Image (tube, helix red, strand yellow):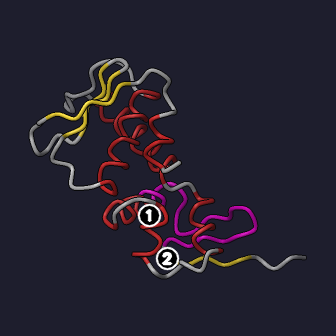
Amino acid sequence: MNLYEKLENLIPGMKITYMNMPDKLKGLTCRDEVYLNTNLINYYHATPILAEEVAHYLTSSGDITDYKHINNMKQEVVARRYAHHLVVPLHKLIECYELGLWGDIYGMCMHLEIDRSYFNKVIEEYKKIYGTEVKHKNYLIQFEPLNIFKEAKK
């Protein structure tokens, strides 16, 4: 099952509809329906958008389209971070390392089923959350510069 299908299955009964939307609007969630812009370039672009809309469904409440309100902006950040963890959890970075893909951004993005710009956004957000590095499952993941190290067993 690919990542897009896994995201679809996170919310039983969720309907996904593709429709023409303004270019700036990539997706929208309303009740049990997710609307995705038909202008999304490809699978690797659509998958992260679906992830963010699923994250909005799971974490947001009410109409948060007006960003003049701080609470709406906070809900947007929470959903975006949730989506990043859905699409590129830390263990998937480790998986890229273990598969020998580390350092090959194109190969990593293909494996993660995302485009390069989204990968860069996730890494930038992880720097805000974790700082320059984080330890996860016997690995040290550095975000600045991007690197990964397996910790020696004691």
Is residue 14 depicted above or below 51 in this figure? above
What element does badge 2 sit on? strand
Assign the C terminus to one quadrant of the image: bottom right
Q: Is 39 rendered above or below residue 144?
A: above
The residue where tag 2 is placed is 146
Return the residue found at the far front: 1
User: At label 1, which amino acid type do we have?
Assistant: Ile
Q: CA distance from mark 1 to mark 2?
A: 8 Å
User: Label 2: how many residues lie within 10 Å, few (<14), some (14-19) or many (20+)?
Assistant: few
Residue type highlighted by circle 2: Leu
Q: Residue furthest left?
A: 22
Q: Which residues are magenta?
A: 125-143
Q: Is residue 22 above or below residue 85?
A: above
Numbered circle sitting on residue 123 = 1
Is residue 106 rendered magenta in the image?
no
Lateral position of residue 137 relative to residue 54, left or right: right
Q: Residue at x 49, y 50 (%)?
A: 2
State which tag comes first along the sequence, 1 or 2.
1
Q: Where residue 78 sits in the image (x, y, percent)?
A: 43, 38
Dot 1: element? helix
Is 134 magenta? The answer is yes
Please report the residue visible at 49 percent of the width from the left and 82 percent of the height from the top: 103
Residue under the point 39% across and 75% down: 106
- State the residue in front, 37 or 80: 37
Q: Are marks 1 and 2 in contact (CB under 8 Å)?
A: yes
Residue at (27% x, 20% y) in the render: 63
